[in-house]
Amino acid sequence: MSILIKNGRIITASDDYKADIYIEGKRIVSIGEKLKVNADQIINARGKLIFPGGIDPHVHLDMPFMGTSSSDDYSTGTRAALHGGTTMVIDFVLQTQGKSLHHALGQWQKRSNGKAFGDYSFHMAVTDFNDNTRKEIKDLINKEGITSFKTFMAYKGALMIDDGQMVQLMKEVKDQGGMVTVHATNGDMIDTLIAKHKSEGKLSPWYHYLSQPEVTESEASGRFCDMANYTDVPAYIVHLTCEGALNAVRQSTKRNQKVFVETCIQYLILDASLYKKGFNGAKWVMSPPLREPKDQDALWAGINQGMIQVVGTDHCPFKWKQKLMGKNDFSKIPNGHPAIEHRMELLFSEGVRTGKISLNKFVEVSSTNAAKIFGMYPKKGCIAIGSDADLIIFDPKEKHKISAKTHHMNVDYSAYEGWKVTGKVKTVLLRGKVAIDDGSVKIKKGYGQFVKRNKVSKTI
Ligand code: URP
Ligand code: ZN
Ligand code: ZN
């Protein structure tokens, strides 16, 4: 099967030019002006932008968490992602404390095998580092192509590891060619604040926000950077939300340390005032919580300064019935919000259209950098000869509104209900096949493949 995309304006992390793209099988075969080739299918992209398929390196699909499971599985989650131009996601395998990493991997393989529409990979979350776990790291990197290891400095008793485990894990991961990523908030401080608020009868979603002040994140981010510097491991902070945490990373650059930083779309465009809406604020209960407008400014600036390389979602949806588990106690509200479908359109509309970021920066933070950081470039994350033909054909002018009535995620509300967006994903190609065309899905469940990743480095 061959496809010729004609007359589009190609945008990569570095370039902006008009050319045709010729695809044979799964790959891009040639790019050039007015290509003279015969193709099985011709797509006219006049007036449209062509981006590399989006990569969201932070999603939680079908994840057991806080007494329930996130409501999108591999099928609904990756399909919704494709509708929004995200052709690949990286999910988190969570080790059960007391059990092996391979045990957890087996569970996630069962959940995902044959179910995905879009491509996917796994980070391995190490929640119990010991001598047995240590021995598994090499295999995961070399045999399974899982080269990033997630750690939690919060969620004590379930996911959190202490600093001793962190440093030992970092040393092993460094030796084997992997990367350590982190949820960087101070779990002990947060647990103390949660207990205090509960003892005072302060139980609404507002107190979720007040239990995780900025210092809990800036302190943990600084500590993580110090440990990563000490062990010299490639390091990445997930879902960074605030000025203080970004400044902690900035501090580390003064010794020429490179710690990669991801923020998420919600932290750029939503703020903590949403927690004042009574229990309705539960829709945005996530950790870390939404912050202040001054933090949004710091994050946009951080993107342009090259301090923040990735914009993900931390997509972790729960239906309203699940959120109601915390009706009388904010600490029981399952943490997370749905966004996998809207990341790229929101980032384009709120970032590029408003002039906050350039088109090239948009591609960099929504696709290319994730591919580079996580060992998939140039197979993924770019428009180049030989790369997977993962492409978005995008109408930069079309206006639409986000609503739970029209979205494709398996959740009965939208965290962005009524949000007006300019710019729409029209056609999505995944490995040379049209996956989405004008809102219809053209591939079958199971087309999505697990992507093994390469070893990583401290720089990109
Ligand atoms: O609230 C969140 N972020 N839920 C998912 C788990 C995590 O901490 O990333
Ligand atoms: Zn987290
Ligand atoms: Zn997460």
Image (cartoon, helix red, strand yellow):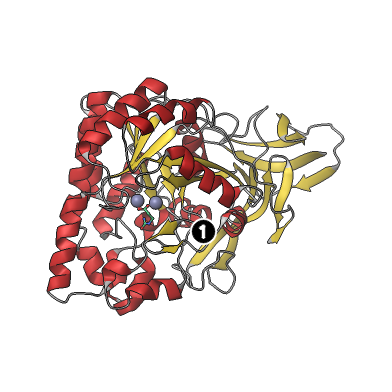
Q: Is residue 311 left or right of residue 285?
A: right
Query: Is residue 359 visible from the viewing direction of this image?
Result: no
Question: Quarter holding the N terminus?
Answer: top right
Q: Secondary structure at mark 1?
A: loop
The residue shown at (24%, 71%) is: 206
Q: Is residue 115 left or right of residue 260?
A: right
Residue nearer the viewer, 310 or 282: 282
The residue shown at (37%, 33%) is: 133
Residue nearer the viewer, 96 or 217: 96
Residue nearer the viewer, 192 or 271: 192
- Determine crowd level at label 1: few under 14, some 14-19, many 20+ residues with C-alpha closer than 10 A: many
Question: Quarter holding the C terminus?
Answer: top left
Residue 369 lies, in percent from the top left, at 46, 36
Depicted 164 relative to depicted 172: above or below:
below
Q: Is residue 389 left or right of residue 346?
A: right
Query: Is residue 102 visible from the viewing direction of this image?
Result: yes
What amino acid does circle 1 point to?
A: His
Residue 294 lies, in percent from the top left, at 24, 55
Answer yes or no: disc 1 within 8 Å of ligand 1.
no
The residue shown at (48%, 70%) is: 414
Residue 217 lies, in percent from the top left, at 22, 49
Depicted 369 relative to depicted 154: above or below:
above
Residue 443 lies, in percent from the top left, at 73, 52
The residue shown at (31%, 52%) is: 158
Label 1, on which residue? 342
